[in-house]
Image: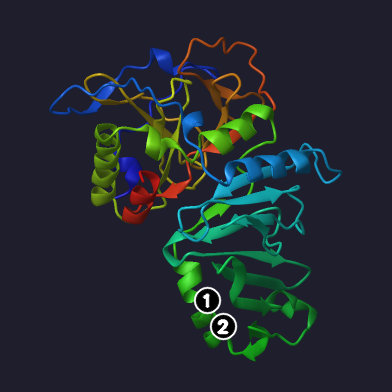
Amino acid sequence: MNVKKYIAAAMALSSVISAFGCAQEQPVEEPSEPVSINTDIDPHSIVFDWQSLYEDKLNQFKSSDAYSEKSRFDIRDLNSDGIPELIISPNDEPKTVCQIFTYTDGMEQLEDLGASGQFRIIPSMNSFGYEYTGDGFTFGEYCTIEDGKLKPSVTYYNNAASASAGAVIKYEINSEETSLVEYEHALKDYTSAASLCIGRKYTFGKDSIDYAIHCSESWGAVLSDAQKSIYKNLLNDILKNSPENDAAFELCDLDGNKVPELVLSTGIAEDSDCRVYYLNEAAIADLGNGCGKNGFFCFDMKNKVFFSEGGAELQCWSLTESDLSGYKKSESYMECGRKYLLTGDGINAAFL
């Protein structure tokens, strides 16, 4: 069953600019006891050793000649060790690689990797890689992190796109020529596994950097056990009823009350939207309207507005009383909805 058919169908937007505050709440789960949505834990009070080093590196890059308005960054655990890596994407040009920093006893820079300023992570394999297509050829690589170092698992190359030019077609795995059958077999586990595109999640605005460093990795410590159970039960129920899909999810504080909402991405197709769930005193509720496209929307941390780009105007929503008329995005925003794959491992990782 497709996840979009399992959760409530998105309600059509009545206008280009709309507010979720007017949407009818749709209770999803009734807990046995009322659940307090108040918390005395500010995510900024959760301190990790890597935070100050990563924040300094981001500010240092922003002050460098490599920085531009197209620069982005990401914070993501690439090897499932519980400590996120820092990924800096200078721009989105085809040949642009990402700078990757990891933390053990201190911050270390790994080898640059990626194409178009991004790469893909395969959580089930603790692997990540990229693919670059040039003039008549394709080159790619998958890697892991071992002992604080980048370790290539497989590299591949083919020039099949040059066939029309009369070139001799070659397929290579780890720089050794192979048959097409051997080539496809060597890459099968990587190409068939579910993955997430990372590297360009956050802009370099002041509020973006603050949220990424001091909030994004802290929700597991902020949420109470009861709050975690409600979100996990919902996700596990959706997963149980629609196990084969491209769904993903993310915890994100969309209204600034220090309790994150749950953003569920229904897939990666152009018509895939996001569903937003929040906790109230009696239940978990669905805000009603689907929002975004390609399975994500952008969230403006400074203005507490989330929006979807494309077309002549932005589609905008807010959980606060923000005035959406004439809204213009700030320099601090992020792509929201696809931080964790909707899998058992993804759910467990999000609520540590």
253 relative to 240 in the view: left or right: right
Quickly name the residue at label 2.
Answer: 183
Q: CA distance from mark 2 to mark 1?
A: 7 Å
Nearer to the camera, 326 or 190: 190
Nearer to the camera, 4 or 211: 211
190 relative to 350 in the view: left or right: right
Across and down, in percent, residue 321 comes to 49, 10
Q: Amino acid at mark 1?
A: Leu
Across and down, in percent, residue 306 comes to 54, 26
Quickly name the residue at label 1.
Answer: 187
Q: Residue at x 74, y 42 (%)?
A: 71
Across and down, in percent, residue 296 comes to 51, 38
Q: Is residue 310 visible?
A: no
Secondary structure at numbered mark 2: helix
Count of picture labels: 2
Mark 2 surroundings within 10 Å by alpha-carbon count, few (fewer than 14), some (14 through 19), many (20 or more) = some
Question: Quick check: marks 2 and 1 in contact, CB under 8 Å?
Answer: yes
Across and down, in percent, residue 51 comes to 59, 42
Whether residue 283 is situated above or below residue 273 in the rendered picture: above
